Image (cartoon, helix red, strand yellow):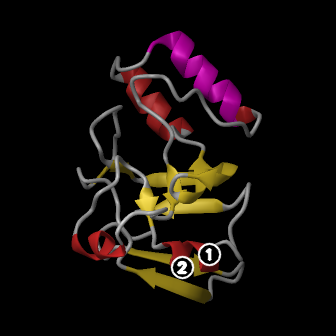
Amino acid sequence: MDTQALTLTVLSAENHVLVRFHNISIGSGGAAESHRRGDETTPRGVFHVTWVDRHSRFDTFYGLDYPSAHIARRAYVEGNISEAEFDAIMQALRHRRTPPQNTPLGGQLGIHGLGRGDPSVQQAVNWTDGCVALTNRQLRLLSRWIDVGSRVVIR
């Protein structure tokens, strides 16, 4: 995902473009290297889909393994999370599970649709709390290529 161009690109294993979605939305706080609960930014980094909710109020929700090891390590060094929180995050990531979502780093970040939201808002403003949003139609197309384990790069 390109948070500057507001595009989401699906690449093949050989790095060929399979599809590109335009006019995606990110957090209303923009994109950031560090995300904290409530700041409404979309974190940059490399993540993986660890869970899917096909009955989300936003249509389908692809949950990410946020915070990543890099983000957690930096937050621990900077004193933003405790050693216990850092250890719990790292253990979850080692076992390819969703890290704790209740630390000061926040959670529940992923890729989702609009649900019953107004599609015109999608093109006008970045409106999410930190997730990446597509239109429901775009999300249905994306579902051909994304599932648990998929690698997601947000830059």
User: In what quadrant of the picture does the C terminus appear?
Assistant: bottom left
> Horizontal and vertical percent for residue 59?
57, 61
Give the camera-side residue of 109 and 65.
109
The x, y position of residue 135, in whole percent, is 46, 73
Residue type at mark 1: give it: Arg
Residue 69 is tagged as none
- Residue 35 lies, with reference to residue 76, above or below; the image says below
Against 84, residue 149 (above or below) is below
Up-down: is 71 above or below 116? above
Magenta residues, dominant SS class: helix
Residue at point 34%, 53% (across, down) = 128
| Res. 48 visible in picture | no
What residue would you read off at disc 2?
137
Q: How far apart are marks 2 and 1 (CA)?
A: 5 Å
Q: Are marks 2 and 1 in contact (CB under 8 Å)?
A: yes
Q: Is residue 120 magenta?
A: no
Residue at the (52%, 52%) spot, across then down: 57
For the record, the magenta segment spans 82-93
Mark sitting on residue 140: 1
Looking at the rendering, which quadrant does residue 60 occupy? bottom right
